[in-house]
Image: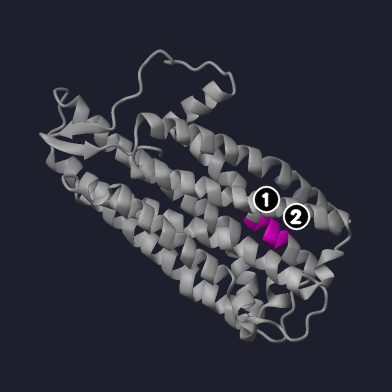
Amino acid sequence: MVSTLCAVLHALLSCLIPPANLLVIVAVCQLLRKHPGSSYIYVLNLATADLLVGVMCITEALDDVLDGDFDRSKSFCLTRISLSMTPCIGSILTLLLISLDRYLAVRLPLSYRTLLKKTPVVLSLMFLWMLAFLLGHLPLIFPSFQQSNYTGYCGLLSVARSEYLYTLCFGVFAPSLLVLLCLHISVCSIAYAQHTRTPHSCAQPGPLRARLRHFKALRTVLLVLIGFGLSWGPYLVGGTVQAACRSCDLSNTLKDALFILGETNSLLNPLIYALHSRDIRSHLAKLLGCRQRGRGQPVASSIHTVGGRGWPRASGM
């Protein structure tokens, strides 16, 4: 019964994740034509990573239909796990870049647009995917990370040794979450200090709107970060407990359920951006043929002036 429910959930995710992220990708591509900026590019990269997770959900759903025939092959299972982990690592690293982008926008408003030109952004994304591919495919590249006694059940700890999970948890996810938390605290403190130093008057609507956009951008990224932690956190914690405790053995059904919970993060991200990003929401509404209030109002420009300084807008958030 539970295995059937997991198969149904896999099929449901495989039907929802790719279309949802494809819509976000199309909307962000349209926004990039009007307002080129690093924030939109990073959001596009996040949606691409989530789309890849959705593609892997399709393969898992097909495997459920075939009653796990593919799982009997250790090589296929290693490939499947590697291809599943690579976009997940890409997602968390992209969140890191998005938060760093917001930090630079608030911390260095004058030099922000100079720092994040096309070349640095492209190089950062190339490095991100090279690192994600390397970390995701460690069990395939180095046999020392592979389990010697594969039983035919395809799972992270069933086909890879506990050292690989430690590498992911304490070498990627934990440091990334710590850096993300520090960046958010730093940006909020800077934004709050700027907010309190500037007189609150009706004569400065532009600066106030600009600050509000940055707070809204931070709120969106924070929601995505919380969603990532709630989705993948239980799976990583459960895997770490099993790897550290030799007598602890999670059931295969529980492992499947926790992994499916992690995959739902790739559906959660486009929903968060669709609900909390005004620009993306308006373009999605146009793509879906919906009418919005204020549709006739033009989209604001990418740069707002704050005290005579160029203030990058929290685009794409």
The front one of 205 and 111 is 111
Residue 262, x across and y down, in percent: 63, 57
Q: Is residue 10 above or below residue 84?
A: above
Q: Secondary structure at mark 1?
A: helix
Residue 32, x across and y down, in percent: 40, 35
**Residue 191 visible in this rendered orientation of the protein:** no
- 3D distance between C-alphas at marks 2 and 1: 7 Å
Q: Amino acid at mark 2?
A: Thr
Callout 2: 10 Å neighbours few (<14), some, many (20+)? some
Instruction: Name the side, left or right, on which 307 lies relative to 7.
Output: left
Query: Overall secondary structure of the magenta stretch?
Result: helix
The picture quadrant where one finds residue 177 is bottom left
Asked whether the beta carbons under mark 2 and mark 1 sit within 8 Å of each other, the answer is yes
- Magenta stretch: give its range: 257-262
Instruction: Name the side, left or right, on which 180 lies relative to 262.
Output: left
Would you name the residue on which mark 2 appears?
59
In the displayed image of the protein, which residue is found farthest to the front?
Answer: 119
